[in-house]
Amino acid sequence: MSAPLDGRTRVAVQLGKAASWLSRAAGRGSGAIIGGRVALALEPRALERLTSGRRVILVTGTNGKTTTTRMITEALGARGEIATNATGANMPDGHVAALMNKPKAGYAVLEVDEMHLDQVAEQAHPAMLVLLNLSRDQLDRVGEIRTVEQRIRKVVEANPNAVVVANADDPFIVSAAQSAKDVEWVAMGSSWRGDSASCPRCGHHIDTSTTEWHCTCGLRRPTPGWTFDGDTVTAPDGTKLELNLQLPGAFNRGNAAVALATAYRQGVRFQDIVMKLNQVSSVDGRYRDVNVNGRKARLLLAKNPASWLASLDLISDGDRPMVLVVNSREADGFDVSWLWDVHFEQLLGRRVVVAGGRAADLSVRLKYADVPHTVVKDSVAAIQSLPPGDVDVLANYTAFRDLVAKVGSEK
Amino acid sequence: MSESKIRIALILPDVLGTYGDGGNVIVLAQRLHWRGHQVEVVEVDVDSPVPNDCDIYLLGGGEDTAQQAAVTLLRRHPGMQQAIDKGAAVFAICAGLQVLGTSFTGADGILHGGLGLLDVTTTPMGRRAIGELIAKPDPALGIGTLTGFENHGGATKIGTDARALGTVIHGVGNGVDRFEGVYQGKVIGTYLHGPALARNPELADLLIQWATGLQLAPLDLPEVDLLRRERLAIAD
Ligand SMILES: [Zn+2]
């Protein structure tokens, strides 16, 4: 149970809620962030006050934060009410908003932007830190991944009592987490090596040609307690658990393994966790099938190179036509050079339509990959340019958001 | 159709390959393939000697540690310098450009010696230049307006032995005298990512011509024309 709020925080929360209500009434979306922002402006330590007495689990990393946060929340569901930022508002204002809305929840499961983990952890005193992966995400905006790793490393050092759940396959995460006293290493797998080729500790080339990657400076892959092979997850005690996820792809099985390890450390039984994970069918609009004038479109979000690579792996097995949508607004990053780090060559033989504000860049990339395609800038029109039937739609952040706003309600 | 393979060397692609610069080799290779030439790409990592028989050498952007690794490698194995003497062309981007200069001062404030293939010195600019970059190329090169995306904190001053690749129309470029990039002989340095050769096909063909002496038939790529129109329009 959370501790009672002091007077100042209570006033801040009430004013925040009023701002949130006004924002909703004015038609500016859910209003959650505005409410959090107002509360934070009035009480800069609102996050500390609002997390006091709750058991806090912070989830960070470049990819899979929203999905893993959702999975952990589901898996912990039986343990009582949970405050969580389910819509991916992962900065402190989003956290304050989520906590304000569930004042009585004993648990807080919060997705945290990797650049804000130190700031949030300093106030939230996490019981657990869940560290997924680090790769380039909007390089022109966020800065270098090395800096991010060092900041996360400091958070781990500053919270010696936190149980850490960390990806053993990502050298940057291992570097950040390895000083923790109590770590659950999960072999999440990773096909993206673009950023981890040079060692976070010494800058030398890391040989990642084998699973058991290692560096000459001594940084190496720890032995993971949690592994998965196909749909089977093996726990540290050797227990084998069969997953039957509705979410597709190896990366979601990795996210599920992390959720398993996290919920297990909170005392939930294996079978209860697995049952809950299997029920998750879509996350904040992703992976859903929507009907667009007779086209059954499966919506996939890929925000950055690593995520594009994983998503293309996921959909390239099939033979559905696909629509690729890329924008370059501020939230996406203005630089789309990363398109050249993604192996679009594997799409040869598929019917491809490109859309979005940077459709022309994608078109040049596909031309040089010898992949025939058409360009239809508007993403809905792009889906409609294909014959009725199944379509895979892969979009980056603002492109996905716009598309869900346009077709999300069509069943 | 063609006699021998054209060889393209990628210097330290694992660490000097951020920001999509690996796309430059895809562009060069395809533009040669489409014209019936065979291409071989040689990846040079820290443990391998640098070959001295490639036609084009590419160095991409990267971090400070990668720059020092590149200087060490290229000094220990001067294959690229030998190839330049035999007529090879070099295309170096951002961190790669700085490495080929006479010296560069990293974010750590330490002055490092470069390879001296370009008469330039790089020092911290005090801020980061990030955004679209457009430049009018040196008319002597006979190529179209340059477009790309810059993301760097270094300012590069050109000495008397080198010439500017172009003059900035939009963006920052070298951060000195409104110049963008540099060339000296057949060695080109630039701050253009994007990657540069995808956005600037005439620059790609210029490198190929310099390196091989081939007479290149024009390629009709409406996709690239559209992209260039879009990117150049932001300066209007
Ligand atoms: Zn190392």
Image (tube, coloured by chain):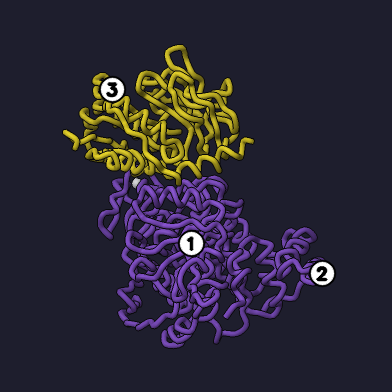
Chain colours: A purple, B yellow
Q: Secondary structure at mark 2?
A: helix
Q: Check if mark 3's residue and mark 1's residue have beta carbons within 8 Å.
A: no
The residue pinned by badge 3 equals B84
| Amino acid type for the residue under numbered disc 3 | Ile
The label on residue A302 is: 1
Name above or below for residue A378 compared with residue A55: above
Q: CA distance from mark 2 to mark 3?
A: 67 Å
Q: Report in which chain the residue with disc 1 lies.
A: A
Queried on whether the Cβ of the residue with tag 1 lies below 8 angstroms from ligand 1, the answer reads no
Identify the residue at image location x=22%, y=33%: B49
Q: Is residue A161 visible?
A: no
Determine which residue is flagged by label 2: A22
Q: Amino acid at mark 1?
A: Ala
Callout 3: residue from which chain?
A: B
Circle 2 crowding by C-alpha within 10 Å: few under 14, some 14–19, many from 20: some
Which element type, helix, strand or loop, lies under badge 3?
helix
Q: Is residue A186 left or right of residue B132?
A: left
Confirm whether circles 1 and 2 share one chain.
yes
Cα separation, mark 3 vs mark 1, equals: 42 Å
Whether the residue carrying mark 2 lies under 8 Å from ligand 1 is answered with no
Residue nearest the observer in this picture, B215 or A338: B215
**Residue B196, image x, y percentages:** 44, 37
Residue at 49% across, 56% down: A375
In this orientation, does residue B175 appear? yes
Position of the C terminus of chain B, as image quadrant, is top right
Q: Are marks 2 and 3 in contact (CB under 8 Å)?
A: no
Q: Tell me where residue B197 appears, x and y as whole percent.
A: 41, 37
User: Mark 2 or mark 1, which is nearer the start of the sequence?
Assistant: 2
